[in-house]
Image: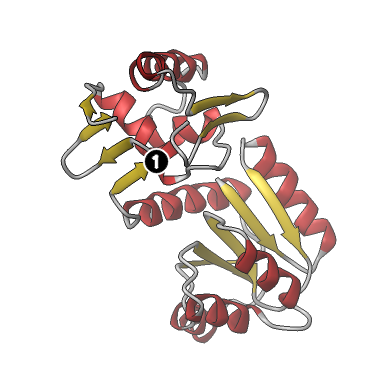
Amino acid sequence: MHILVVEDEHRMATALRRGLEADGHTVDTAHNGPEGLALAERHPYDVIVLDIMLPGLNGYRVCARLRAGGCRAGILMLTAKDGEWDEAEALDTGADDYLSKPFSFVVLLARLRALHRRIDRQRPRLHTLGDLVLDANARTCTRAGTPTHLTAREFAILEHLAARAGTVVSKREILDHVWDADHDADPSIVEVHVHALRRKIDAPFGRAALQTMRGAGYRLDPAGG
């Protein structure tokens, strides 16, 4: 996932960034409301971890402005407060979930994964990248008008990459998304499936849409290669 953490406590923000990066995610941080709002408006984050008590612009107002502007990222609010009115206001302004401080990092990760899956299911299901067309509803894939047969696992990987076209996606994220209940899967299994995908959607057509970003993951060219 590409995650934005908006948290004014620098030590907390640093700890969250390091923990999330260690889990295989790409993380940006902001330490006040206006900075967080500006970053969220410029970049298509998957999930935003948003503290409520922020200088310059509180989390409620940041969330409301993002939703008014059409932001579709999942938003999880953090607050030191623990009351039903704060939780209700967070949800009413457009947040998808909330956690009260202090919280378990393991629980935060689980909530972010669940939120990402929920948001991901709401994304468009027809992906057109140049002459590569993936229809998730019909479960079909064509390249230059030629139907391409993919296994269920290959299709799930390609659909996830297509939804994130132009963004580097880590092996860990692919494992979390495609192998939901099998987190002990060896990351090398992702390489095997990606290699098989290249033989089907790229090699026969002289394309290179599915790119390996060494040490980071994979990227699907939004222009189709």
Residue 24: % across, % down: 62, 35
Residue 103: % across, % down: 62, 58
**Quarter in which the N terminus is drawn:** top right
Mark count: 1
Quadrant assignment, res 102: bottom right
Name the residue that disc number 1 marks. 129
Is residue 124 visible from the viewing direction of this image? yes
Q: Is residue 185 left or right of residue 24?
A: left
Q: Is residue 177 left or right of residue 49?
A: left
Q: How is the image coloured?
A: secondary structure
Residue 53: % across, % down: 71, 78
Amino acid type of the residue tagged 1 in the rendering: Leu
Q: Is residue 89 left or right of residue 101?
A: left
Camera-side residue of 140 and 2: 140
Residue at far right of view: 10
For the point 79% across and 52% down, which residue is it?
Answer: 14
Camera-side residue of 145 and 88: 145
Of helix, strand and loop, which one carries label 1? strand
Quadrant assignment, res 224: top left
For the point 39% across and 27% down, which residue is it?
Answer: 182
| Position of 98 relative to 180 (above/below) | below
| Position of 137 relative to 32 (above/below) | above
Camera-side residue of 199 and 125: 199
Is residue 180 visible from the viewing direction of this image? no
For the point 55% across and 57% down, which residue is it?
Answer: 44
Residue 21: % across, % down: 68, 40
For the point 76% across and 57% down, which residue is it?
Answer: 13
Residue at far left of view: 138
Camera-side residue of 174 and 80: 174
Q: Residues within 10 Å of mark 1 (few under 14, many from 20)?
A: some
